Image: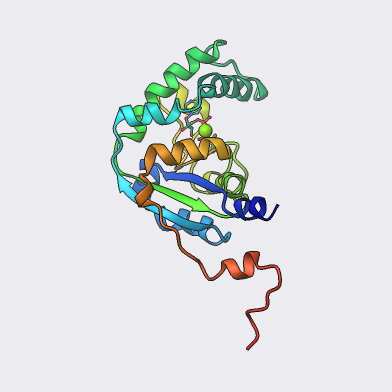
Amino acid sequence: MIEEKRQFKKERTFVMIKPDGIQRSLVGEIIKRYERMGLKMIAMKMLVPTKEHIEQHYTLDSEWRRVTGEKTIKEYKDKGLQPPSEDPLEITATILKGLKKYMASGPVIAMIFEGAHAVQIVRKVTGGTEPLTSDVGTIRGDYVLDSYQLSDNDGRAVRNLIHASGSPEEAEMEIKHWFKKEEIINYRLVQEQILYDVNLDGILE
Ligand code: ADP
Ligand code: MG
């Protein structure tokens, strides 16, 4: 039980600032949003990914092609629009092509954040995939204006500043894909005391 609790507070998620986030000078702004939630950054690096690395990243989850295609079709229909195809896999083949071009177009910043509910908290602050419909107050909702319609019409990926893992399982696969073990740093952050300590007995002198 104690072991289970400790792991719970150490959930990890993989976050990447995509090339447009860097070109829009939003690196500090984006990191600040995760940092101030109380999450601990345990790895970070800047690199220009290859198209192969991007394809592998998106297909680590064997269900990604189907789920992403279905999600896109649903979003179109919810808006009363005609999706570009009724076949989810056909849609994702096009998305993946666009994603490889987008994500390998310049430097990205890859990071790992750790803390309670890291995956869900990061997704909440990041906002939904399509900036047009992401909630106001989220990073994607506040800092960018792209839509499925606009990007699909131009045959490119939706530019939404950030990638963030969708589940703890996806996070573990993505962390292994982007980071070597020795690039991940184990350290104590003093604020964890106020976030997680049960007795709060270290404050008063
Ligand atoms: P998320 O990044 O929110 O987890 P997905 O995993 O569904 O979203 O898709 C991965 C990325 O592919 C998105 O962030 C976006 O850049 C791009 N994308 C998703 N759906 C579409 C689409 N219909 N048209 C163009 N690009 C898309
Ligand atoms: Mg995803």
Relative horizontal placement of residue 37, taking residue 105 as reference (left or right) = right
Q: Is residue 177 above or below residue 190?
A: above
Q: Nearer the viewer, residue 16 or 137?
A: 16
Quadrant of the rendering where the C terminus is positioned: bottom right
| Residue 154 visible to an observer of this rendering | no
Q: Nearer the viewer, residue 72 or 132?
A: 72
Q: Is residue 93 above or below residue 4?
A: above
Count of marks placed on residues: 0
Which residue is located at x 49 percent, y 48 percent? 143
Which residue is located at x 61 percent, y 25 percent? 75
Q: Is residue 159 above or below residue 136?
A: above
In the image, residue 61 lies at what x, y percent? 50, 27
In the image, residue 190 lies at what x, y percent? 53, 71
In the image, residue 109 lies at what x, y percent? 37, 47
Res. 161 image quadrant: top left
Q: Nearer the viewer, residue 202 or 39?
A: 202
Q: Nearer the viewer, residue 150 or 57?
A: 57
In the image, residue 148 lies at what x, y percent? 52, 27
| Residue 88 visible to an observer of this rendering | yes
